[in-house]
Amino acid sequence: MQSVNTRKMREQRLLCRLGKQVRHLRLAHNISQKDLASGSGVGLSTLKRLENGQGCNLAALVQLLVALNCDDKVDVLFAQLAEDVAGSRAAIRSRASSPRKAVDP
């Protein structure tokens, strides 16, 4: 089982990646934070927190993706996240399954 610190670090990395993706999508559509916030029904402070890696609730993320016309990309996003999680679990398993020294009885 992973430690609380490891889990928190992974959560923070994921939040940062999500925020960067939303920022990238917003800029690709040439939309200001203010316009996206008002067009999606999400508060400006919520959008800023998300883009800065501090997260938001799932409903706000969905509203933003719909406003950016990117709701069809959710499957791709979760597929990439699943691959990342599988890769990190494989790395953890490979370390945990290393040979152990025999103990004399």
Image: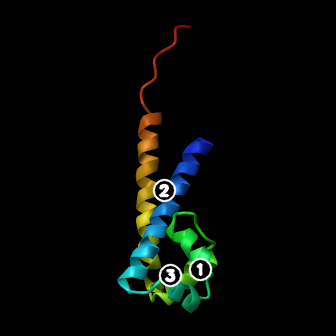
Spatial CA span between label 3 and label 1 = 7 Å
Count numbered badges in the picture. 3
Residue at 58% over, 89% down: 38
Q: Observer-nearest residue: 59 or 45? A: 45
User: Mark 2 to mark 1: distance in Å?
Assistant: 22 Å
Q: Could you tell me if the residues under marks 2 and 1 are in contact, i.e. CB atoms within 8 Å?
A: no
Tell me the residue that label 3 is attached to. Answer: 33
Q: Amino acid at mark 2?
A: Arg
Q: Residue at x 43, y 81 (%)?
A: 26
Please name the residue shown 46% across and 23% down the image: 100
Expressed as whole percent of the image width and height from the top left, the position of residue 62 reads: 56, 81
**Toward the viewer: 16 or 100?**
16
Q: Nearer the viewer, mark 3 or mark 2?
A: 3
Task: Identify the mark at residue 97; answer none if there is no mark.
Answer: none
Q: Which residue is mark 1?
A: 44
Indicate the secondary structure of the residue bearing disc 2.
helix
Neighbor class of circle 3 (other Cα within 10 Å; few <14, some 14-19, many 20+) is some
The residue tagged with tag 3: helix, strand or loop? helix
Q: Quadrant of the C terminus?
A: top right
In the image, what residue occupies the spot 39% across and 75% down? 24
Distance from the alpha carbon under mark 3 to that under mark 2: 22 Å
Q: Badge 2: how crowded within 10 Å, few (<14), some, or many (20+)?
A: few
Q: Secondary structure at mark 1?
A: helix
Q: Is residue 39 above or below residue 22?
A: below
For the rendered model, the colour scheme is rainbow
For label 2, the residue is 13
Which of disc 1 and disc 2 is earlier in sequence?
A: 2
Q: Are marks 3 and 1 in contact (CB under 8 Å)?
A: yes
Label 3 vs 2, first from the N-terminus: 2
